[in-house]
Structures are given as structure tokens and as C-alpha cells.
Image (cartoon, rainbow, N blue to C red):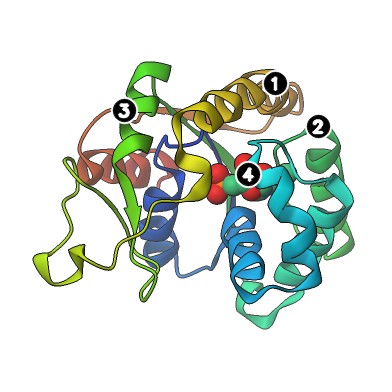
Amino acid sequence: MHLILLGAPGAGKGTQGALLAEHLEVPKIATGDILRDAVREGTELGQSAKRFMDAGELVPDEVILGLVRDALAAPAAANGAIFDGFPRTIPQAEALSEILMELGRDLDVVVVIDVADDVIVQRMSGRRTDPETGKVYHLSFNPPPAAVVDRLVQRDDDRENTVRRRLAVYRETTAPLVDFYVERGLPIEHVRGDRPIEEVQAELVQRIGR
Ligand code: AMP
């Protein structure tokens, strides 16, 4: 199963993708997570990606494609993957098709999580990550356990100005991928993401029929 999760930043791709990955027993390939790990580790990749990320801009396609190629070639991804935050541009989508073709695999479905912009901005301002477990919480909608509250951190790019830029980049550059995949005849499933996590997940599992 190769599934693409599309949706604005903060729509819930990470949360839903992690649950789906567990359900389908395939890894989640989240380019944003891979980049944040690289930034934390201070690698060359991390250093070059950080300035794009902090500005809410996209990291160049060739950098991203190298990461995805490696992740897909890993034994863990032999039976498929959930793509979260990738592809984000038409050239990335074209390259993904080529990479999969080389591996003798194919995309199965595109899931779009729809959430209005004002809800997104509200969500991102309350989003916090536990640096020890990588778990993501929301101070109001998915409250963290008391034991971890003090160590939670806010992503640098979740500040309001950067969120607005990331949303604009999503609308301009990534949202057109929906039409791109419609034109290629791939099944597209839209789900409304402004509902409780469990409800969205249940609908997703039902829609993809697995
Ligand atoms: P995310 O965690 O998916 O919201 O990604 C955080 C940031 O990482 C984005 O705002 C981009 O700067 C960068 N990034 C993540 N995935 C991609 C991608 N597929 N293409 C370009 N930049 C990306």
C-alpha cells in the first residue's frame, strides 16, 4: 500500500499518518520529520534545510528526493509507505512516480485532509512536541499528560507569521497536486479534518477499505 496524505500544515497528517501506518503495518515517510531530525543532529543537510524551514519556504526538490529515495529503498518500506508532507510540488510528484516505477511499485490512493485556514492557525499555536518521544500534542484539543508538560517544545516554524507563509505555500504549490492526481486517475479520498482524531481515523480506515 502506497498512500499519499495531502492537507495544509496542521491538518493532522502527522497524527493520522502515524495511526494509519500502525494500522496498515507500513512505515510513515514524513520528510518534515526527517529534516527536523537532521536539524537537531546538526548535519550538513540540517544546516542547509533550516533556513528554508524557518522561513516557511520549501526545501529544494533535489534534497527532498534524495531523502525519499533512501527511505523507500529501506527494507522497512518493502510493502509500502504512507507519505506525509511529500510530495509538495508537481516535480516532486513526477519524481515519486518515477522512483516507484523503478522499484516496480505504484501509488494506490491519495487522501486529502480538509481543514479551514482559521482552524489551522488556531491548531498550530497550541501544537507542542515531546522532544523525548516525538509525540505531538495540542494544549487544548489533545492535551499532554502532566508528566511531560514541562519538557514540551514548540516547533520554530509554528509561529503565526511562518504558519501564514506555510499556508500560502500550500495553497499555491501543493494543493494543485489534487488535480494532478485526479488527472492521472488515482483514487482521491477527501476527509474533513476538523473533528476528533478518532473520528477522522475511523473514516479514513473505512474509506481506504483496509
Ligand atoms: P512539515 O513537517 O511537513 O510541515 O514540514 C516542515 C517544513 O519542512 C516545511 O515547511 C518545509 O520547509 C520542509 N519540508 C518538509 N517536507 C518538504 C517537501 N516535501 N518539500 C519541500 N520542503 C519540505
Image height check: is 176 above or below 19?
Answer: above
Of mark 2 and mark 3, the one earlier in the sequence is: 2
**Element under label 3?**
helix
Nearer to me, 56 or 192: 56
Distance from Cα at disc 4 to Cα at disc 3: 19 Å
Q: Which residue is mark 1?
A: 176
Of mark 4 and mark 3, the one earlier in the sequence is: 4
Of mark 4 and mark 1, the one earlier in the sequence is: 4
For the residues bearing labels 2 and 3, Cβ distance under 8 angstroms: no
Which amino acid type corresponds to the residue marked 3 in the rendered image? Answer: Gln
Residue 196 in view (yes/no): yes
Distance from Cα at disc 4 to Cα at disc 1: 23 Å
Which amino acid type corresponds to the residue marked 1 in the rendered image? Answer: Pro
Q: Position of residue 58 (x, y in %)?
A: 73, 39
Crowding at dot 4, Cα within 10 Å, few <14 / some 14-19 / many 20+, comes out as some
Which amino acid type corresponds to the residue marked 4 in the rendered image? Answer: Asp
